[in-house]
C-alpha cells in the first residue's frame, strides 16, 4: 500500500532519498555524534527534506524540516509511522508488555486519555508553594555560596525530588541517586542505543534498578493504603494508573505497573534537567536578560504568596528564556519512528519497516524562521514577533500523536524552578567569555562539566 503525502504528485515517480556523503566505513557517525542538530541542518540544506544517513553501521532515512514536523500531525503521518520498536528494549528490561511512548494507534489514545490529567499542569494545582519549598530546601542544602556548582547533575537531583512530590506527595529522597543512575543507563542503552547492551550487567545499574523497582512497589502499597480516603481532587497520576489496573487489567496489567508508575522519571528527568541547565547558561551569558529576569522574579515573589493562575502570565521573560533554550538546545533533535507501509514524502519514497528520524528541530536553526538563528534572543516570543508560531517552525515538545504529554506540567515546573533560582541565588558563569560545553549522550544538552559560581544569596 502506498500513501502519498505533501508535495508528491500522484503521477510523478517517487525518488529514493539521497545518501549523505560520509567517511568510508563509519559514514556519518562522527558528525552526527558531535552535533546531531547541526548535522541535520547541513543535510537539509544540501539534500532537501528527505535523505539517508549511515550511522553506526546502519542506514537510516531522515525526514527533516518544517514539512517533516507538520507531517507528524497529519492523518497520513499518523497512519504511516509507529514508535513501538524504539521502546521494546525498555519494555523487555522491565518485564512489561508495553509503554505509553511505544504504543501506537487506538491503544495509544486510550493510554493517553487515562494519563492525560495526571501529566497535565492540573497535577500541580494547589502545590506550587510546596514545589517552591522543595526548591528552597535544595538550594539551602546543596547550593552553597562561595562554591562552583556542576549544573546538570544539580538539576537532575532537583527534578527527581520535584517529580516525586508531584507523583507521590513526597520527595523520594532515599531513591534520588538510584532513579538518576537507572534513567541514565536506560536512556543511553535501551532508548537512544548509544551504549552497548552488556553495560546492563553493570552491578551499579542492577542495584539502582532494584531500588527503582522497590520504589514502584512502595507507590503501589501507598495507593492501596490511601485510595479510600482520597477526594477526587486529591487523585493524581498514580491513582489514575492504579484505578485502570483494578478496573481494566487488559489495558493496565500487573506486569506494566512498575514501568508505568516510574515512567514520569524517565520522561522528566533528563528533559527538564537539560533544559533548565541550558536556560541558566543562556541567561547568565546575557546580562541584559538576567537584569530583566531579576526585575520580573523580584516582583513576582515580593509578597507572602502568589496566585497559581498568574505563574505563566507574570513570568513571561523567564518563560521566554526557557523557550529560547529549548530552541537552541532541543532535547529531542529528532523523533524516532518506523514506517508502517510504503509512503511518499515530498516526492521521496519511504519503504515499509524503514527506521526513520523525523528531524523536527531543523527549523529551529533556520534563518527563514528565526532570523539570526544562533543568537539567544528572547524577543522572538513576543506577541509582535511570535517567530515560533510559524507553521512547523518550533517543536521542542515533539509533534503528532506522541507530543509530550507532560508539556503543560513541564512548563510550569520549569518556569517556577528557574524563577526561584534567579530570585534566590546570585550566580555567574565561570568567566564571562565561557562558551557552553555540550554533550550528546544520553540526550543532547549541556555537558556535565558546565558549572556556575554561586556568589551568594540574593534573598
Ligand atoms: C523540557 C521538558 C520536556 C521536553 C522538552 C519534553 C519533550 C518531549 C518530546 C519531544 C516527546 C515526544 C517523543 C516522541 O515523539 O517520540 C515527549 C513525550 C513525552 N513526555 Fe515530555 N518533555 C519534557 C518534559 C516532560 C515531563 C516533565 C513529563 C512528565 C513528568 C513528560 C512526559 C512525557 C510523556 C508521558 C511523553 C510520551 C507521550 C506519548 O508517547 O504519547 N515530559 N516529551
Image: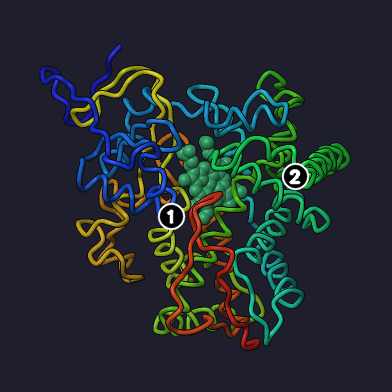
Instruction: Kindly check if marks 2 and 1 are in contact, taking CB atoms under 8 A apart as contact.
Output: no
At horizontal 17% and vertical 31% (from top left) the residue drawn is 7
Quadrant position of the N terminus in the picture: top left
Q: Which dot marks residue 205?
A: 2
Picture layout, residue 276 above or below residue 4: below
What whole-number distance in Å separates the C-alpha atoms at marks 2 and 1?
27 Å
At horizontal 40% and vertical 36% (from top left) the residue drawn is 400
* Drawn side of residue 328 relative to residue 107, left or right: left
Q: Would you say the beta carbon of the disc 2 residue lies within 8 angstroms of ligand 1?
A: no
- Give the labeled residue for mark 1: 330
Picture layout, residue 72 above or below residue 359: above
Secondary structure found at label 2 = helix
Residue 239 in picture, x, y percent from top left: 73, 39
At horizontal 64% and vertical 88% (from top left) the residue drawn is 456
Residue 269 in picture, x, y percent from top left: 62, 53
Query: Looking at the image, which is closer to me, 255 or 199?
Result: 199
Figure coloring: rainbow
- Residue at the extreme top: 1
Q: Which dot marks residue 270?
A: none
Q: Which comes before the other along the chain, label 2 or label 1? A: 2
Q: Dot 2, how many residues are within 10 Å of its Cα: few (below 14), some (14-19), or many (20+)?
A: many
- How many numbered marks are there? 2
Can the viewer see residue 339 in this picture?
Answer: yes
* Drawn side of residue 393 relative to residue 112, left or right: left
At horizontal 22% and vertical 64% (from top left) the residue drawn is 371
Quadrant position of the C terminus in the picture: bottom right
Residue 61 in picture, x, y percent from top left: 34, 32
Secondary structure found at label 1 = loop
Residue 308 in picture, x, y percent from top left: 58, 65
Quadrant housing residue 259: top right
Quadrant housing residue 277: bottom right
Q: Would you say the beta carbon of the disc 1 residue lies within 8 angstroms of ligand 1?
A: yes
Amino acid at each position: 500500500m502506498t500513501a502519498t503525502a505533501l508535495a508528491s504528485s500522484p503521477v510523478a515517480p517517487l525518488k529514493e532519498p539521497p545518501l549523505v556523503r560520509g567517511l568510508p566505513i563509519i559514514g556519518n557517525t562522527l558528525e552526527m555524534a558531535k552535533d546531531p542538530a547541526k548535522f541535520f541542518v547541513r543535510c537539509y540544506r544540501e539534500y532537501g527534506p528527505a535523505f539517508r544517513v549511515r550511522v553506526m553501521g546502519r542506514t537510516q532515512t531522515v525526514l527533516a524540516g518544517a514539512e517533516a514536523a507538520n507531517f507528524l500531525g497529519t492523518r497520513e503521518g499518523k497512519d504511516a509511522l509507529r514508535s513501538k520498536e524504539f521502546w521494546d528494549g525498555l519494555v523487555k528490561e522491565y518485564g512489561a508488555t508495553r509503554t505509553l511512548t511505544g504504543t501506537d494507534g487506538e491503544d495509544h489514545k486510550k493510554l493517553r486519555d487515562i494519563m492525560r490529567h495526571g501529566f497535565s499542569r492540573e497535577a500541580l494545582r494547589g502545590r506550587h508553594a510546596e514545589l517552591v519549598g522543595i526548591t528552597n530546601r535544595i538550594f539551602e542544602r546543596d547550593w552553597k555560596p562561595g562554591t562552583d556548582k556542576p549544573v546538570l547533575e544539580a538539576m537532575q537531583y532537583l527534578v527527581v525530588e520535584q517529580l516525586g512530590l508531584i507523583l507521590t506527595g513526597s520527595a523520594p529522597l532515599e531513591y534520588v541517586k538510584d532513579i538518576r543512575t537507572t534513567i541514565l543507563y536506560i536512556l543511553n542503552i535501551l532508548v537512544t542505543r548509544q551504549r552497548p547492551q552488556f553495560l546492563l550487567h553493570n552491578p551499579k545499574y542492577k542495584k539502582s534498578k532494584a531500588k527503582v523497582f522497590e520504589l514502584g512497589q512502595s507507590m503501589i502499597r501507598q495507593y492501596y493504603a490511601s485510595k479510600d480516603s482520597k477526594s477526587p481532587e486529591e487523585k493524581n497520576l498514580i491513582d489514575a494508573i492504579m484505578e485502570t489496573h483494578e478496573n481494566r487489567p487488559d489495558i493496565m496489567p500487573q506486569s506494566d505497573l512498575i514501568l508505568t508508575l516510574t515512567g514520569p522519571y524517565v520522561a522528566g528527568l533528563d528533559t527538564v534537567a537539560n533544559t533548565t541547565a541550558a536556560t541558566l547558561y543562556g541567561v547568565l551569558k546575557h546580562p541584559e536578560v538576567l537584569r530583566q529576569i531579576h526585575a520580573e522574579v523580584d516582583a513576582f515573589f515580593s509578597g507572602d504568596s502568589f496566585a497559581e493562575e498568574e505563574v505563566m502570565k507574570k513570568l513571561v521573560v523567564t518563560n521566554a528564556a526557557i523557550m529560547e533554550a529549548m530552541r537552541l538546545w532541543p532535547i529531542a533533535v529528532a523523533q524516532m519512528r518506523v514506517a508502517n507501509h510504503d509512503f511518499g514524502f515530498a516526492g521521496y519514497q519511504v519503504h515499509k519497516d524503514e527506521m526513520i528520524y523525523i528531524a523536527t528541530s531543523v527549523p529551529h536553526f533556520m534563518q527563514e524562521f528565526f532570523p539570526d538563528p544562533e543568537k539567544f534572543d528572547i524577543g522572538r516570543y513576543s506577541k509582535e514577533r511570535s517567530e515560533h508560531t510559524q507553521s512547523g517552525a518550533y517543536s521542542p515538545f515533539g509533534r503528532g500523536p506522541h507530543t509530550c504529554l507532560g508539556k503543560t506540567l513541564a512548563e510550569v515546573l520549569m518556569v517556577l524552578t528557574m524563577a526561584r533560582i534567579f530570585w534566590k541565588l546570585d550566580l555567574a558563569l565561570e568567566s564571562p567569555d565561557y562558551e557552553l560545553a555540550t554533550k550528546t549522550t544520553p540526550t543532547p544538552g549541556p555537558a556535565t562539566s558546565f558549572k556556575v559560581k554561586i556568589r551568594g544569596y540574593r534573598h
